[in-house]
Amino acid sequence: MEDENDYIDNIINKIGKGQYGAPSELEKILGEDLSNKVQKRIIEIFEDKTIEQITYEVLDSKYGNGTERMLKLNIMYNIVQNRVNEELGYDKRHKLNEKQIEILANRVIEGEFGNGMERKEKLEKIGADFREVQNEVNKIKGSGKKYDLKLLYIDEYIKKLYSKEITDKKVKEEVGEQLYNFIKNKVNEMNNNNSRNIITKEGIDQLAEKTIMLEFSENEQRKEKLGELYPFVQNRVNELLGSNVRHDTSKKPSYLYLD
């Protein structure tokens, strides 16, 4: 008698041949319980391969094209296809659903995507919002830390304020006065405007928190993005992370008030 695992594997084989129609129809045809078991088994099948390995198998035509590829990859399709599109230089990205975010979070915990900026960059290559995946990681590991997904990254606010796609009032409402002041100062620099808004100790604390949350890249990129505030922010980052390394803060910008 065919056991459940063989039965599910047989279904997966038929899915790959298109016998159950589009992936979106799977739950309607199989029912919620069996559909979930099938998806769980598909995840298990791909567990021994990294996203990079699956991507290069796709590029080697192992999973066919179009609908055939979508059927064979199933729950993994959006994740892998986003990485394939990145590799081929295409801009198109498929939105990841909750189950796919959970898959990525578990792979993060297993160490597939590294740490820090490496993790952020690798997740962005597959069209994932680092913050969304990290929230799921924190949830699985029982951490209370949560990124606010409604907010843009600081770089995005700068670009949108510079291009006037968003108003000063809206930015200030969303990020608060101190981060707004930092964003506005960067926009003024881009406009060759010497006017600067005041940054306080609270602002340095907030920028340090954003740095720890990987908003400002690493090394030279971080220095460039933070500008003359870099040593002050990095010292606060080091302090929060328990490091004794200190940068020279003798050249304090006139708009920085730390008292």
Image: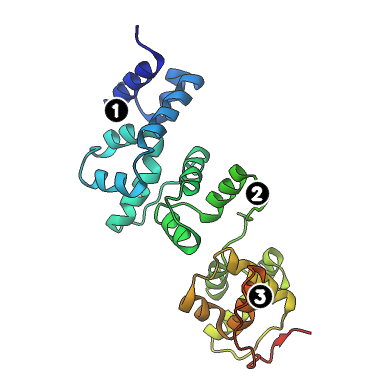
Q: In the rendered image, which residue does mark 1 sit on?
A: 16
Q: Measuring 67% from the left and 77% from the top, which residue is drawn there?
A: 181
SS at circle 3: helix
What residue did someone put label 3 on? 236
Query: What percent of the width, then of the height, locates residue 127?
Result: 43, 52
Q: Considering only order in the chain, which callout, 1 or 2, is on the residue closer to the N terminus?
A: 1
Quarter of the figure with residue 45: top left
Instruction: Tell me the element at label 1.
Output: helix
The label nearer to you, 2 versus 1, is 2
Rendered residue at 50%/62% (across/down): 116
Quadrant of residue 79 within the rendered picture: top left
At label 3, which amino acid type do we have? Answer: Arg
Count neighbours of disc 2 (C-alpha within 10 A) and say few if under 14, some if 14 to 19, many if 20 or more. Answer: few
| Residue matched to label 2 | 143
Q: Earlier in the sequence, mark 3 or mark 1?
A: 1
Measured Cα–Cα span from mark 2 to mark 1: 38 Å
Report if the CB atoms under discs 3 and 1 are less than 8 Å apart: no
Closest to the observer: 13 or 137?
A: 137
Front position in the image: 245 or 101: 245
In this rendering, the answer to whether 148 lies above or below 72 is: below
Counting residues from the start of the chain, the first of labels 3 and 2 encountered is: 2
Image height of 10 relative to 211, above or below: above
Q: Residue 247's x, y, as percent?
A: 59, 84
